[in-house]
Image: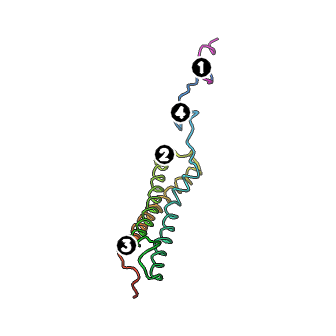
């Protein structure tokens, strides 16, 4: 009868002696949170893809205006278009950096082992790629705005 003295709360669905409170990782019965692949890959590649789009749209379109002989792109001044073509990719790259930092701060992101090591490695690479991408987008945007367009050397 001593085994039956400890019982779970009625309607809790648990076994006798078990509490319904979530346990921390490392405690018996505790679970680590799994890192979802979507946010992880966005954190790693989001900034680089945004930078690539910035290069294609900001620089290519500026060059097209030289061929056309005007300072307008579809009725929009080149400087305004360059600001939009810089601002949107910069926001995406910063968002990728923020997602990376949020995933990094989760402790632990995975149970110990090879998968946890891989996730940490991807987040480290993603952090530096995102920082580099943000800087390159901002520097490229400054160059488009500051350097005169359509100048032959």
Alpha-carbon neighbours of circle 3 within 10 Å: few (<14), some, or many (≥20)? some
Residue underneath mark 2: 106
Q: Are marks 1 and 2 in contact (CB under 8 Å)?
A: no
Give the structural element (helix, strand or loop) at label 2.
loop
Single out the residue that lies furthest toward the bottom.
Answer: 153
Residue at the image point whose x is 46% and y is 73% from the top: 73
Alpha-carbon neighbours of circle 2 within 10 Å: few (<14), some, or many (≥20)? few
Give the structural element (helix, strand or loop) at label 4.
loop
Single out the residue that lies furthest toward the right.
Answer: 1
Closer to viewer: mark 1 or mark 3 = 3
Q: Is residue 10 left or right of residue 144?
A: right
Single out the residue that lies furthest toward the left.
Answer: 146
Asked whether 13 falls inside the magenta stretch, the response is: yes
Give the structural element (helix, strand or loop) at label 1.
loop
Give the mark nearer the N terminus: 4 vs 1.
Answer: 1
Q: Are marks 1 and 3 in contact (CB under 8 Å)?
A: no
Instruction: Give the CA distance from mark 1 to mark 2.
Output: 31 Å
- Estimate the x, y position of residue 8 in percent, counting from the top left: 59, 19
Q: Note whether 44 is above or below 34 in the view shown.
A: below
Residue underneath mark 3: 145
């Amino acid at each position: 009868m001593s085994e039956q003295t400890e019982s779970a709360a009625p309607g809790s669905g648990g076994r006798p002696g078990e509490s319904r409170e979530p346990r921390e990782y490392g405690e018996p019965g505790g679970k680590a949170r799994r890192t979802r692949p979507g946010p992880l890959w966005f954190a790693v590649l989001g900034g680089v893809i945004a930078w690539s789009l910035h290069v294609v749209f900001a620089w290519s379109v500026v060059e097209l205006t030289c061929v056309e002989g005007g300072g307008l792109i579809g009725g929009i001044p080149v400087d305004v278009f360059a600001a939009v073509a810089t601002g949107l990719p910069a926001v995406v790259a910063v968002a990728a950096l923020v997602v990376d930092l949020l995933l990094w701060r989760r402790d632990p992101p995975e149970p110990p082992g090879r998968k946890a090591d891989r996730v940490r490695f991807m987040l480290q690479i993603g952090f530096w790629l995102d920082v580099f991408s943000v800087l390159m987008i901002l520097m490229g945007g400054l160059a488009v705005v500051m350097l005169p367009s359509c100048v032959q050397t």
